[in-house]
Image (tube, rainbow, N blue to C red):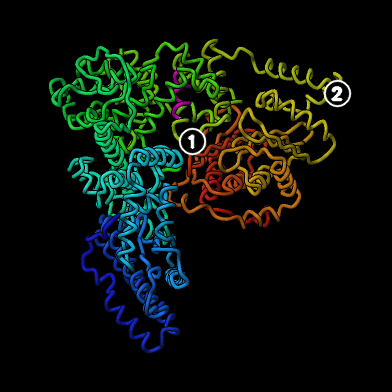
Amino acid sequence: MTSAPDRIIKQRDIIDRTALADKIEYIVAEDGPQRCRPQILELLQGALADGRAEIKRRLGESPSQGYRASAEQAFLVDQIVRLIYDYVTVHAYPAANRSASERIAILAVGGYGRGEMAPHSDVDIGFVTPYKRSSWTEQVVEAILYLLWDLGLKVGQSSRSLDETVKMAQQDLTIRTALLESRFVWGDRAVYEEAALRFWNEVVANTAPDFVRLKMAERDERHKRMGDSRYVVEPNIKDGKGGLRDLHTLYWIGKYIHKVSTASDLVHVGLLSVEEYNRFRKAENFLWSVRCHMHNITGRAEERLTFDLQREVAEQMQFADRPGRSAVERFMHYYFLNAKTVGDVTGLFLAHLDEAMAQKGRRFIPSFNRKPRKLNGFQLDRGRLALPNVQFFVEDPVRLLEIFHLADLHGLEIHPSAMRTAQRDARLVDKAVQKDPRANALFLDILTSRRDPETVLRWMNESTIFGRFIPDFRRVVAQMQFDMYHHYTVDEHSIRAIGLLADIESGKLKQDHPLSAAIMRNIVSRRVLYVATLLHDIAKGRGGDHSVLGAQVAETLCPRLGLSAAETETVAWLVRHHLLMSATSFKRDLADFKTILDFAQAVQSPERLKLLLVLTVVDIRAVGPGVWNSWKRQLLSDLFEATEEVLRLGHKQRGRDERIASKKSKLGSALQLSPEKFAHFAKTLPDAYWIAEPDDIIERNARHLLKNEGTELAIDACYYPDRGATLVTVFAADHPGLFYRIAGAIHLAGGNIIDARIHTSSDGMAIDNFLIQDPLGRPFREQGQLDRLARNIEEALTNRAKLMTQLDAKPKALRRADAFKIAPSVLIDNQASNRFTVVEVNALDRPALLNNLALALFESKVTLHSAHIATYGERAVDTFYATDLFGAKIESKTKLKSLETRLLEAATVRARVKTKAA
């Protein structure tokens, strides 16, 4: 159990307990012990508010002193608890001759017991009595708790006898951990000391290995729950990987085994070196600073460093903008470096622990029985790669690469002491090593390994060898991308992409990526693809187009790695164009043949097309969980297949007329109508419809139209698994503004349109197909959801005023999206299509954005033919294929300018109620 922290300066400026105690005595004397509670509560409320204000003021003056602020907060609560206890036991419920059972010790447990609290942390306290609770102790405990609650404190409390305390600690790991950090606050010290003695003798004794195993399993489960990476861009400061809880776990383990009273004692018992402890304390202080600022800003116990908080905390901690990097990006870069330090210290701590426990015959990390191998001077220590002496890397710095190559080649782990030495000697990787052909060959073998390159590259990154050997990579280590799209830092994203590439090649992801898996078996330039994947984002954060700058890096680095001139050219091309395929697939109409031709002209070779597809797939999937879906897979596959046909044959194998005829033939066979009736039906559908829609949607549309023949409005909604979305078809009399009303109705039903195709039959009926997902990128599947979609659309098309009112009443965007400033832009291109004017709008995503843009198009008197909606976190990119009212491209400069102005206004203003339009 823990002693109180002794690191508070000018304590009485925070709270003067003696003076407050005198005031309480005066109030009791004036009003009597039974009527003075309101005045005492008011006095304590003022003292708590003043104390918090003083701690906040000190943190504002020294914004990086979070560790001190956490101790001051615990000190403040200590004094409040002591004042309350004295008032309750002396005045509210005095007991002149207390029995042996009428004794209470108040213990601070958990973080409060450690003497560390953020401004709005829970107050975790335990009431311990020697025996079963008496009526007096129950009254006292209840009175103390009610006063704490009335002060607005969130209290986690327990009330147990000594026997109950021991029994519960033996059975429950959480209770045992809380008591491990318990600290005497006030009351009967003898009871506390007996509790401490029994805890160590009856709970802790001979259970250290079991405790370590359980705490490490608990840690691993917590990491999985929080994203299993210390490089997520909205990290949980307390419980996330690389957060405060990881440091606490080290302290708990050290305390449990060696009974240390402070984290600095971990040095004395050999679990951390002095240098490692200093890194421990520096990281802990930074994380506490961030956490305290977060609590102060939000006014609550907020532990997740969300985007909106990142800006404010960066400002509070006095980070400033620098050329090419904003203050918030510099702050988050520093955060991730500290999170990495937490990981480094954890690994070293566990290595020391493993060695110490192994010497006692109680191994924590399991040993490995492997046969000796040819290891070029390296040794095996319990199945892990180790060094024969501490100068081994100094003798030949290329060995700093070789150790990772051997680990990959033989499937070995690296001994923590060898990893520590590698970190120490990383400075030996100078320009001579960078240019060494042997070193470059070793690195390229690791990068292109058919085993587990992701794990080994991550080890290299943790040891800093990676960044030393590839200086351009070092510039993106711990670099966040301040947006809601990317979930990881740039280095973590790139390493994850390499891992995904290896998994696709090995067949592990064949079910998710059948086309990419097939391509990987046939590509000629395998190592080109791995190098391009590593380098695709390597120039981020340099203030220019990272694709162009990255290609320049590739042109310099690839020859050093041993790639030929042809391979270097291909890598540079892939890096320069790594966003081209996704941009074309998600933002352009793939049914417009000009799109395919322009893309094919940019790619130029089937091999490049294959490489670009696989690179695009791993780039998207490595962004984070939930970003990849079957809709994106289908679009990329469609673009690949159409482009591959053009590149292989020099033209489309089947011309426009042949494709239309083929689709009509398939539909005729499926419907089994009379030739006359089918011919009449097929004639009403425009050629663009047959080109744009796939066979299965054409058949579903046809059955829907035939079933509702003669009606003016028919709506069909179904789950469409091939695209991971919901397909909504609207069959209605065509009229201006139909699209924006449908878009508004879908928004009100909670749906996001991801793709839209708008067609008009020869008899004046609109056949509009929409692909829809919920805000989390999932399809609507339940019948109730599908019915609500259809009902909302029907109401919108028959009662327009109600739609506009409902849209205006919709809640505003979430605050975290407001942390981003995106200047809306409108790009109008008359060259991207032979038939349409292509309009692309970039804007901050928000509710009803598409509806507002569609309304602007309607007011500009343009006809919409298809819409393609892509979102990248907080950024929306909506592309429209449009013509004027006569079906021609929009050529008038005046009209184009007016269209641009209206769309910019719609992209800027959240909602517009237009009575006339309604």
Gap between marks 1 and 2 measured at Cα: 49 Å
Image location (x, y in percent) of residue 130: 38, 63
Q: Is residue 351 visible?
A: yes
Of 210 and 57, the residue lying toward us: 210
Q: Is residue 646 above or below residue 698?
A: above
Q: Tell me the quarter of the picture where residue 394 sits.
A: top left
Query: Image quadrant for the N terminus?
Result: bottom left
Mark toward the viewer: 1 or 2: 1
Secondary structure, mark 1, is: loop
Q: Amino acid at mark 2?
A: Lys
Q: Is residue 618 magenta?
A: yes
Q: Which residues are magenta?
A: 610-619
For residue 518, side relative to residue 726 (left or right): left
Of 853 and 633, the residue lying toward us: 633
Q: Which residue is mark 2?
A: 677
Image location (x, y in percent) of residue 407: 30, 20
Q: Which class describes the residues within 10 Å of circle 1: few (<14), some (14-19), or many (20+)?
A: few
Q: Residue furthest front?
A: 100
Q: Is residue 307 visible?
A: no
Secondary structure, mark 2, is: helix
Q: Which mark is residue 625?
A: 1
Q: Is residue 61 above or below residue 872?
A: below
Of 207 and 374, the residue lying toward us: 207
First along the sequence among labels 1 and 2:
1
The residue positioned 36% from the left and 35% from the top of the image is: 490
Q: Is residue 14 magenta?
A: no
